[in-house]
Image (cartoon, rainbow, N blue to C red):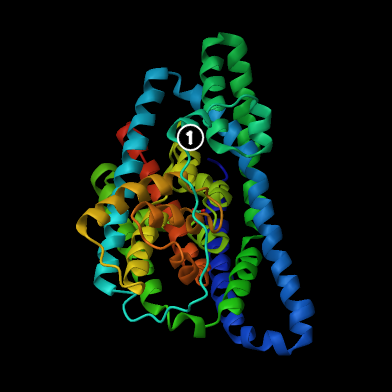
């Protein structure tokens, strides 16, 4: 508490620096991009250096995920103290994740119907792509259970880590005095890990600049024109979903204004946009809801890592838009039945999408094949997928934080004003 007054201005100026880094990165990338191929100094030194800075930032964030999630989830589960309460939080979280995801796909389909992004596209003849098979449901379930928790951690298998940490945290309560010592230890580790998050985030303005500059330079403004409609449909869909659905949820259940909500998660949203990774953004997401909303460790350490793995509203919305885009580009009429099929498969596909860059594009093959659309359509979207990935990852992460705030409020937690 004592260092709060000092922390607030520091955090505010950091956020401003991150925003400046973002804007400068976009401007720099757009200006420098067209000159890169003809200027050896830019091509051989400047851009590779900027790329390296971005990659280092991404690695630093990724480095935090496993120790931070495990320690805070053990401490969080132990602090909840009651297995029934943990179960209730789990059911609520999954229900909210599923409902918001289904709404996102419907919105994606609506945007696709409204914008008609694929109508009149000239499809080149040399498209090729291969479909991804959906995993059998039994294997999906089996995959949640670790055989070796240390291996789960080295592979950063989030669902397995979550499951083991929950067992471990609950067992800490059951083990009485000795268990308390262990959960206190993990509480301390998680506090220390949050300090590491702060150290890494002080590097964020440069990391954000580098990541967005490289993307902007690579794509330039010119590539946007032929795909303006599909990009517009995904971006507008994401904004509408965030502004309508999440604002409503936060207003209804947490009794807080949308402004309060969006202000509190700005760092996480920008990090998601530039890293295009829900998992990579997790340290920032966790620290934002804890520090800006006052959500407890018990709720945030469970809801957010789970969300970064299974809750992908942005990905689902994007799959809805892209399915329509491909159907229109190939002149295949999409019946209502097919659109309902898309809602069902895109929900499952988004759950199965890993929180890493580009994963949604791979899962799109599953959605297309399931409703009989040509998977060659993937090649149409692949060229601009980075631009779509930025928006959908941002929505994925913002969706996790909205559910986190709502679950905390419905568990009786008083959120910061
Ligand atoms: N990049 C997204 C994420 O990390 C997943 C996707 O590609 O849709 O949330």
> Ligand 1 near label 1 (Cβ, under 8 Å)?
no
Residue 89 in the image: above or below residue 389: above
Left or right, 251 with reference to 361: left
Q: Is residue 258 left or right of residue 74?
A: left
Q: Where residue 398 sits in the image (x, y, percent)?
A: 42, 53
The answer to whether one can see residue 335 in this image is yes
Q: Choose top left, top right, bottom left or bottom right for residue 391.
A: bottom left
Which residue in the rendered view is the most extreme toward the front?
A: 125
Please say if 307 is above or below 389. above
Q: How packed is label 1: few (under 14 Cα within 10 Å), some, or many (20 or more)?
A: few
Pick the front one: 309 or 52: 309
Q: Nearer the viewer, residue 130 or 388?
A: 130
Q: Which residue is mark 1?
A: 140
Q: Secondary structure at mark 1?
A: helix
Which residue is at a point 36% across and 73% down the rendered structure image? 329
Q: Quadrant of residue 20?
A: bottom right
> Where residue 1 sits: x, y (%)?
53, 40
In the drawing, does residue 218 fall left or right of residue 310?
right
Nearer to us in this view, 121 or 116: 121
Q: How many marks?
A: 1
Q: Is residue 307 above or below residue 46?
A: above
Residue 190 drawn at (x, y percent): 61, 35
Q: Residue at left 59%, top 10%?
A: 177
């Amino acid at each position: 508490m004592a260092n709060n007054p000092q922390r607030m201005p520091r955090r505010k100026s950091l956020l401003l620096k991150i925003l400046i880094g973002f804007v400068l990165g976009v401007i720099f990338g757009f200006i420098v991009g067209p000159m890169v191929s003809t200027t050896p100094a830019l091509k051989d030194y400047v851009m590779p250096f900027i790329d390296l800075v971005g990659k280092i930032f991404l690695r630093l964030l990724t480095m935090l995920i496993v120790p931070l999630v495990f320690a805070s989830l053990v401490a969080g589960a132990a602090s909840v103290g009651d297995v029934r309460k943990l179960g209730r939080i789990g059911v609520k979280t999954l229900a909210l994740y599923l409902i918001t995801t289904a709404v996102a796909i419907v919105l994606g389909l609506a945007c696709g119907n409204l914008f008609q992004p694929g109508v009149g596209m000239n499809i080149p003849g040399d498209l090729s792509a291969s479909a991804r098979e959906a995993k059998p449901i039994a294997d999906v379930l089996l995959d949640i259970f670790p055989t070796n928790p240390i291996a789960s951690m080295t592979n950063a298998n989030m669902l397995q880590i979550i499951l083991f940490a929950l067992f471990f945290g609950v067992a800490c309560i059951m083990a009485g005095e000795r268990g308390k010592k262990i959960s206190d230890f993990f509480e301390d580790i998680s506090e220390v890990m949050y300090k590491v998050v702060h150290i890494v985030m002080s590097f964020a303005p440069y990391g954000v600049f580098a990541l967005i500059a490289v993307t902007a330079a690579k794509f330039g403004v010119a590539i946007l024109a032929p795909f303006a409609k599909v990009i517009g449909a995904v971006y507008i869909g994401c904004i509408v979903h965030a502004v309508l659905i999440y604002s409503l949820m936060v207003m209804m259940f947490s009794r807080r204004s949308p402004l309060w909500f969006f202000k509190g998660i700005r760092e996480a949203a920008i990090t998601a946009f530039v890293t295009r990774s829900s998992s990579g953004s997790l340290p920032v997401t966790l620290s934002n809801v804890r520090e800006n909303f006052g959500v407890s460790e018990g709720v945030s350490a469970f809801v957010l890592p789970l969300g970064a793995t299974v809750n992908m509203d942005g990905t689902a919305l994007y799959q809805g838009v892209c399915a329509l885009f491909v159907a229109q580009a190939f002149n295949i009429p999409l019946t209502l039945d097919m659109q309902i099929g898309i809602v069902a498969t895109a929900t499952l596909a988004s759950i199965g999408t890993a929180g890493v860059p580009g994963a949604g594009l791979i899962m799109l093959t599953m959605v297309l094949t399931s409703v009989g659309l040509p998977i060659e359509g993937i090649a149409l979207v692949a060229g601009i997928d980075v631009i779509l990935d930025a928006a959908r990852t941002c929505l994925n992460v913002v969706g996790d934080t909205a559910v986190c705030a709502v679950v905390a409020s419905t568990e009786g937690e008083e959120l910061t004003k």
